[in-house]
Amino acid sequence: MIPAFDTAAGWIQETLLLPMLFSLGLIQWEDISFGWALFAVYGAAQVVVTFAVCVPLERWRPVERWPDAQAVVVDVLYTFVSRVGLLPLITYVLFFKLQVELSGALTDMGYVPPTLERIFPFLFGMPVLTFLLYAIILDFGEYWRHRLSHVFRWWYSLHALHHAQRQMTFWSDDRNHLLDDIIGFAWFTCIALLIGVPPMQFPLLVLLLRLIESLSHANARVSYGWLGERLLVSPRFHRAHHGVTAAGEISVNYGAVLPWWDMIFRTADFSREFVQTGDPTAEEELATGGYFTQQWVGAKRMLRDIFSSTPRGAG
Amino acid sequence: MVTKDRSGLDGMTRRGALALGAAALLPRSAGAQAGAQAGGGAVLIMNSGAASLSVIDMATRRETRRIPVLREPHHWALTPDHKELLIGDSSGNELQVLDPRTFAVTRRMPISNPYHLQFSGDGKFFVVAGLARNQIDIYEAGSYKLLKRFPIKSMPSHMDFLPDSSVVFVTLQGTGRIAAIDLRRLEILWDEPCGNAPAGLLVHAGRVLAGNMGGDDVAVLDAKTGKTLRRIRTGKGAHTLFWAPDRKTIWVNNRLDQQSVVVLDAATLDPVRRYRLPGGPDDLEFAPDGNIWFTMRFVHKVAVMDPRSGDFTTIDVGRSPHGIFLNPRAIATA
């Protein structure tokens, strides 16, 4: 499978990207264009796989049936903007540049840039194991980012857009305020830089984690069983986090991919069944508005909270 | 996996080859040995997108092992005593040091952004072009003590030296220029335009030749002044340039459209032969048996071409193979 992705990325680089870069006078970037191509191939494959897995599941065992799914349409837009559009390419280029600058500067100062392989030399030459370890560390970081986004009121005002959806489907994973996405990207990138994630693995890690996150948002009555639910975040487990009684400051099940962190930090709740989703405190526009309305209302809400004298009480 | 391909020879340019005389055109030993069985030795490929080095047995043409590196290996440099082979891991910020005969990894050295690297001919300087960090670093060879860093705009790519090792020339891919640095005084002599996105560079008879990847030509500059004297059209995406072992021809790889290898007569700099070589030919090395080994960036393979016929076979390697080193070179000179 991996060689097929490489071949596809090589073809895109050779037949589409390089002629385009050449005609735009940007051919000097050809060296990293393979990374862009690979990112796009994995992004497209991820949407296809998510679609192929989640649509049958949602049709087979839906938690809820809605007379119309108008509110889902905007989530589809969020997904394409986030995964196949320009954002993944910018993510890759930015990360590549930051990684080179940071590690080069550290080398100049006499420090060896941090990498897992340097800390644990037995990992050298074991890319699959290293990749999995990177994924675990990044998921740990995601747990805390997500948990903190529920703690700080101004941050939750942005994150409320994600929770406002009453018609939660696998498309809802990318339903985020742009500022929330930027904070998330900065957080994820900083951790990736600190542990020395290779640029070529960065997009793959993002995509792998997001694939599992998409599945966890599916409108599907799916549980992984007692043990499975404790190994990987399931739709049932994550739905509890999106429940109307869990939105806001005090919630449960913050884990994105692994429920381990919730278990360790005592925020796991395996008891809730397939609950109704949404945030009753959120403005209606955040639930049913269009893309730009949602962005505007989310920003207004954040500003109001920043300048409000009320200390706490989000959600 | 080894795959055989049809002839890559462009018939139109065969006439040029005949005019020049095929024996003079072919690499040093090709006339006598082409077609002979491949000899011993091994090839090292720098898989820039796979964080690894592929070792290929030259006789069987099979990959025998894969050596992990930290991040992104691109180019190599052989120490002046030929005892160490340095592989530059650009985003890994380190040099991986190998025994050039066995390819055993002997040590690793942290160094900032080593993209392209070479020792000066007199063995006194070790120069590193940091493409991603816009810097050219001059080190003392042997001690690897940094003598001077030249922050420079932008994307310093490939380099070559004057025969007396007094000056190093570096292409600046981002700004379409070439910089000449005086190694004795450690100062920039000139920084002149040469075209669009220059990559490979070669010094030849008081002139500097650079492949303009953003154009379709090799620019010829005066080594003293940096003034462009001539442009030789080779093909879209002109990229790297290499001397044939007999130094009678210069081989230019073109990366775009009609991906090809163009042979220049070193005396006149006129194109005399063209080979079709799809797959993004990048670096090349001449084998003692007369064949030429190419890294093929876009298809993740290495091509082995018989320059008499243009026929080539390919061998699968890792992602985005870039630098290539044939160890008979080290064995022969040890």
Image (spheres, rainbow, N blue to C red):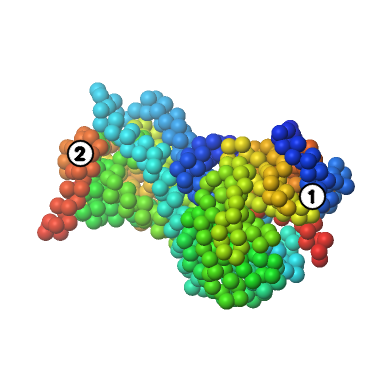
* Quadrant containing the C terminus of chain B in the rendered view: bottom right
Answer with the quarter of the image where residue A82 lies. top left
Q: Decide: few, some or many residues near mark 1? Use Cα within 10 Å; few <14, some 14-19, many ≥20.
A: many
Residue under the image location 69 percent in, 60 percent down? B205
Q: Which mark is residue A293?
A: 2
Task: Give the total of numbered labels.
Answer: 2
**Image coordinates for residue A124, horizontal then vertical, percent:** 60, 58
Answer with the quarter of the image where residue B186 lies. bottom right
**Image coordinates for residue B181, horizontal then vertical, percent:** 57, 68
Q: Residue furthest top?
A: A67
User: Does residue B98 appear to the left or right of A104 in the view shown?
Assistant: right
Q: Badge 1 sits on which subunit?
A: B
Q: Nearer the viewer, mark 1 or mark 2?
A: 1
- Residue A251 seen from this side: no
User: Does residue B42 appear to the left or right of B271 in the view shown?
Assistant: right
User: Does residue A9 appear to the left or right of A235 in the view shown?
Assistant: right
Asked whether A308 or B205 is in front, the reply is: B205
Answer with the quarter of the image where residue A9 lies. top right
Under mark 1, the amino acid is Pro
**Image coordinates for residue B228, horizontal then vertical, percent:** 56, 56
Whole-number angstrom distance, CA of label 1 to CA of label 2: 68 Å
Q: Which mark is residue B27?
A: 1
| A167 to B206, vertically: above or below | above
Residue under the image location 72 percent in, 41 percent down? B273
Q: Decide: few, some or many residues near mark 2? Use Cα within 10 Å; few <14, some 14-19, many ≥20.
A: few
Asked whether B108 or A305 is in front, the reply is: B108
- Residue B249 seen from this side: yes
